[in-house]
Amino acid sequence: MPAYAVIGGQWGDEGKGKVIDYLAGKVASVVRYAGGNNAGHTVVNDRGKFELHLIPSGICWEGVSGIIGNGVVVDPEGLLSELDGLGSRGVDTSLLYVSERAHVIMPYHIVLDELEEKAKGVNAVGTTGRGIGPTYVDKVSRIGIRIGDLLDIKGVLVPRLEQALSFKNALFTKVYEVEPVNLDDILAKCRVWADRLAPHIQPTEQIIQDLLAGDKSILLEGAQGTLLDVDHGSYPYVTSSSPSIGGACIGLGLNPQEIAGVVAVFKAYSTRVGSGPMPSELLGDFADELREKAHEYGTTTGRARRVGWFDAVAARYSRQVNGLTGMVLTRLDILDGFSAVKICVGYEVDGQRIDRFPSNTGLLERCQPVYEEHPGWDQPTASATDVSHLPANALSYVRRIEELVGCQIQIISTGPSREETILVHEIIPG
Ligand code: IMP
């Protein structure tokens, strides 16, 4: 049976956690392929509210396994605290598997993330400070530590750590002029991680292939969003992985023919955390009102999110990069009660109209939004469970987004819980 992907269509925080939890009952496994605990996925179901950063959002469904693929970077401390948190609330985590090929976020990566951001000064990316970038750098530099290395401390881990620390400590002492890292301190932590994580460390590519050969589907869980993709996002204000669909093949050992559907989640407006261009950004009192109403503060860092109108130019780009087969629209209820709502339908730079998302960040920064205004709606969309419950103006807004992006909306989310969902078209058949 095939794989279906649910990924971020914007700058992350689109509400993927809720959508994945809603769909996960239909699959054998929910699988993360990129990023790390920089993500923050909120899930609200009959067991309560869960804030997940690394563990796939289907974990609350009994019998559904969770897989952290090779493309993910794993902070073992973060993973253990999530496992403990879920365990203390009675959630079974025995079916959580971590790829032996996934790279480990070491304590020195977290320190480096902070030092690099400080050194960048006004050009800082505004990272989550979780050590994500420095871990991917080491992976590509071939001096990273993989989760599987923890299971062979003497034979593999010690020599690899010695090599990595020779580079890191030169950097710490000579460039940043801070204290070096002690090998024994790190090894002591590795021993604890190895003991606790050993049952979860598996050849996940094989598990995935076996599942696909059986009669159940799997769900690929994107983290962050397409506009934060290291290649396709607003570089350099991006994360260090590939949240777009291409990252799923690399990050899981999956071939593209096995992916039957690619659905991206979009908020009914826009948000962004951290630095970088955001053409439809709103500032001032209305932005504050929207932010407070939607409680737009980061799940991972608590930072206030930048807010803006729905950007159809960026969304269309996202559709193209990912070959989207469908969309999910979340947080429509946040727009309830506004007298008018706007959609960014183009950009203007130096008096010229642009209808494409530029790769040149300088150009993107100068893009002024061209808006289309639509009448708002007074009746609530909150908690609606059927398209027929939507006020006429809300439905026209949804239809206009579909038209501008060129893609069908398959689910509309009208609140945080599983039930507050309008299923327009099935994403996973059966
Ligand atoms: P990093 O992933 O921590 O290196 O941060 C790089 C950029 O991606 C920063 O602008 C972060 O705010 C942003 N970012 C990373 N993860 C998320 C996420 O899950 N949601 C929204 N923004 C994120």
Image (tube, rainbow, N blue to C red):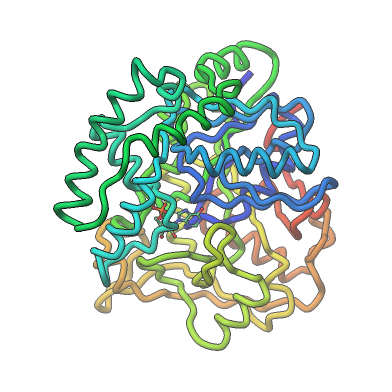
Looking at this rendering, what residue extends furthest in the left direction?
174
The residue that appears at 37% across and 67% down in the rendered structure is 275
Q: Can you give x and y, in whole percent of width and height, for residue 55 in the image?
A: 61, 39
Q: In the visual, does 218 lie left or right of 108?
A: right
- For residue 136, side relative to residue 87 (left or right): left
Q: Residue at x 69, y 44 (%)?
A: 85
Q: Is residue 421 visible?
A: no
Residue nearest the viewer, comparing 357 with 273: 273
Relative image position of residue 7 (x, y in whole percent): 54, 44
Residue at the extreme front of the image, as rendered: 184
In the rendered image, the vertical position of residue 78 relative to residue 26, given as above or below: below
Does residue 305 appear in the picture of this structure?
Answer: yes
Q: Position of residue 365 (x, y in %)?
A: 31, 70
Q: Identify the residue at image location x=76%, y=25%.
A: 63
Q: Quadrant of the N terminus?
A: top right
Viewer-side residue, 165 vs 288: 165
| Residue 332 falls in image quadrant | bottom right
Q: Quadrant of the C terminus?
A: top right
Judge by depth and name the residue closer to the eye, 237 or 171.
171
Please name the residue shown 64% across and 77% down the image.
Answer: 292
Residue 367: % across, % down: 33, 72
